[in-house]
């Protein structure tokens, strides 16, 4: 009897890369003997319903062909279950694929990881009834996302570049109240990030050192700094050397509540919700198909 998996594709992910990536990965999965149930939603809500139906029917795994947004959608359905998540990267950032060293530009090799059926169990972060895998952004980076989402032009990465420049002109430190386990602090900061994993935004390692299996959240903030200093520090996020900056502050906690006026948080690149938000670590909540 063929082993059935669901393949959930975002056809518009990465400027149509999702559709092209599926066309390469699908034959590999079928050749390995899988019965592949192809799912393509017309909207996020439609995709979620299609995936939920497949899970109710007992598919062996839910494999997403897309970026971190598709991983985020699937995670809401898979958290706390025994059904694993597979990833065929086809997005822009693909940070979750980076966590598991899944090839981001070779769909056949990514499909081979699904075929191998090795799983790792990782933690998730949860706020209310919503989960995230990567990092929750709640400062300057979240403001950029929010501004970009209201822009109709240009498309793609240039929209975020222009939003960054526009936000940088007006951004000022934000007054936060943080409840870190049993401690409460008031602090002015440029940004606050809550990491289940180390990176977001296509390899920006804001929460460098975060461990997906330690049952803890990594809370990172930058206290007030000049705008030129912020611009100079940004490239250091790609290799984690920003941790030496005197404005960098890092906590490891099981729970955190973040409160600030006028901030809408983003997680896994998706609009997550306005502050205040209470986030907790959920140990061992997700199974992921990985190399070993």
Image (tube, helix red, strand yellow):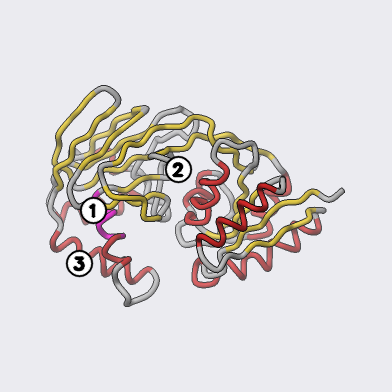
Which-is-in-front pick, marks 2 and 1?
2
Q: How far apart are the two marked residues, 2 and 1, measured between alpha carbons?
A: 22 Å
Is the C-beta separation of discs 2 and 1 under 8 Å? no
User: Residue, x 75% and y 63% (percent of image)?
Assistant: 27
* Mark 1 lies on residue: 140
User: Toward which corner of the image does residue 218 lie, by quadrant?
Assistant: top left
Magenta part, dominant SS:
helix
For marks 2 and 1, the one nearer the N-term is: 2
Q: Which residues are magenta?
A: 139-145
* Mark 2 lies on residue: 131
Residue 156 x/y as whole percent: 39, 71
Give neighbour class at mark 1: few <14, some 14-19, many 20+ (Cα, 10 Å): many
For marks 3 and 1, the one nearer the N-term is: 1
Query: 274 or 99, which lies in front?
Result: 274
For marks 2 and 3, the one nearer the N-term is: 2
**Disc 3 secondary structure class:** helix
Which-is-in-front pick, marks 2 and 3?
2
* Mark 3 lies on residue: 166
User: Residue, x 19% and y 44% (percent of image)?
Assistant: 260
Furthest residue toward right: 1
Residue 33 visible in the current orientation: yes
Is the C-beta separation of discs 2 and 3 under 8 Å? no
Check residue 286 in the rendering and tell me which mark sits there, or answer none.
none
Query: 109 or 61, which lies in front?
Result: 61
Residue 17 visible in the current orientation: no
Q: Is residue 141 magenta?
A: yes
Q: Is residue 238 above or below residue 8?
A: above
Q: Is residue 143 magenta?
A: yes
Is the C-beta separation of discs 3 and 1 under 8 Å? no
Q: How far apart are the two marked residues, 3 and 1, measured between alpha carbons?
A: 11 Å
């Amino acid at each position: 009897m063929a082993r059935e998996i669901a393949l959930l594709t975002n056809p518009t992910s990465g400027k149509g890369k999702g559709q092209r990536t599926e066309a390469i990965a699908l034959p590999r999965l079928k050749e390995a003997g899988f019965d592949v149930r192809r799912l393509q939603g017309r909207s996020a809500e439609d995709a979620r319903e299609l995936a939920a139906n497949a899970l109710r029917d007992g598919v062996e795994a839910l494999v997403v062909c897309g970026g971190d947004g598709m991983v985020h959608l699937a995670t809401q359905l898979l958290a706390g279950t025994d059904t694993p998540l597979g990833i065929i990267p086809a997005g822009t950032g693909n940070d979750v694929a980076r966590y598991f060293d899944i090839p981001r530009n070779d769909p056949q090799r990514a499909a081979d990881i699904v075929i191998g059926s090795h799983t790792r169990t990782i933690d998730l972060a949860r706020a209310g009834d919503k989960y995230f895998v990567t990092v929750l952004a709640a400062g300057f980076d979240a403001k950029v996302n929010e501004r970009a989402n209201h822009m109709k032009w240009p498309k793609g990465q240039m929209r975020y570049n222009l939003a960054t420049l526009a936000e940088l002109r007006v951004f000022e430190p934000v007054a936060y109240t943080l409840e870190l386990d049993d401690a409460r602090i008031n602090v002015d900061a440029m940004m606050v990030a809550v990491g289940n994993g180390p990176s977001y935004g296509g390899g920006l390692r804001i929460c460098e050192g975060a461990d997906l299996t330690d049952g803890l959240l990594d809370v990172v903030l930058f206290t007030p700094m000049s705008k030129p200093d912020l611009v100079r520090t940004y490239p250091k996020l790609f290799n984690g050397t920003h941790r030496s900056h005197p404005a960098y502050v890092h906590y490891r906690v099981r729970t955190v509540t973040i409160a600030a006026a006028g901030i809408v948080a983003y997680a896994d690149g998706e609009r997550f919700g306005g502050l205040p938000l209470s986030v907790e670590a959920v140990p061992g909540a997700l199974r992921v198909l990985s190399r070993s």
